[in-house]
Amino acid sequence: MDDQKLTTENLARAIYVVNRHAKTAPNPKFLYSLKKKALLKLVLEGKAKKEGLHFSNNPKYSKQQSDVLVSAGDYYFHMPPTKDDFNQLPHLGSLNQTYRNPKTHMSLSKAKILLQNYVGVHEDPQHSKTYNKHKRTYEKPVFKKLGESYR
């Protein structure tokens, strides 16, 4: 049960897991906001550091865009910059494609619980269930005699 302690390393691992899952999640908004709030709180507490700005790999509207590189423990993350970040942080140029965050083994549910407890934000149960509403339920086929209406 060591991964439930609020150490910088555990929080960084949880952010990594949440970020990795958010990329393919049906409703990624909550996961990305959880990541952002956790990173901001870590920076405010001095447990993480804003290293500089990187050019974004996937800029919106095909315009050049920068992201803030944040280091927490052995992990590096990107998040949207504030206006102050452009004045205070050095620009590091393009993203280094050779560096990868260390692999980690933590379930998404454990990571979410850890970050929700740290940040103090909880997911609205209605938003997490919206994905299931869009799934079609299986309907048994109805066979009618030739010429009969389906209604």
Image: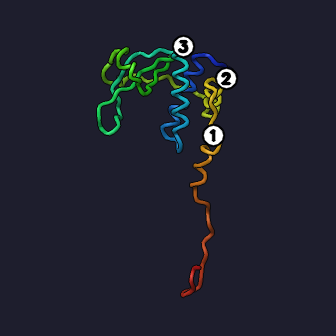
> Which residue type carries mark 1?
Asp
Q: Nearer the viewer, residue 16 or 48?
A: 48
Task: Name the quadrant of the C terminus.
Answer: bottom right
Locate residue 116: give its quadrant.
top right
**Pointer 3: what residue?**
47
Residue shown at 35%/37% (left/top)?
60
Q: Residue at x 54, y 13 (%)?
A: 47
Helix, strand or loop at label 2? It is helix
Work out whether 17 lies above or below 2.
below
Furthest residue toward top = 46
What's under tag 2, amino acid-wise? Gln
> What colour scheme has been applied to the protein in the rendered image?
rainbow
Query: Which percent across, then down, holds residue 40?
Result: 51, 21
Q: Furthest residue to the bottom?
A: 147
User: Label 1's element?
Assistant: loop
Q: Position of residue 76 (x, y in %)?
A: 46, 21
Give the labeled residue for mark 2.
4
Q: Nearer the viewer, mark 2 or mark 3?
A: 3
User: Of the residues under marks 1 and 3, which one precedes in the sequence?
Assistant: 3
Q: Which residue is label 1 attached to?
A: 124
Q: Label 1, label 3: how many angstroms apart (C-alpha)?
A: 28 Å
137 relative position to 40: left or right: right
In this view, the mark in front (1 or 3): 1
- For the question of whether residue 73 can be seen, the reply is no
Q: Which mark is residue 78?
A: none
Residue at (62, 47) in percent of width and height: 129
Q: Earlier in the sequence, mark 2 or mark 3?
A: 2
User: Along the line of sight, which residue is nearer the eye, 109 or 88?
Assistant: 88
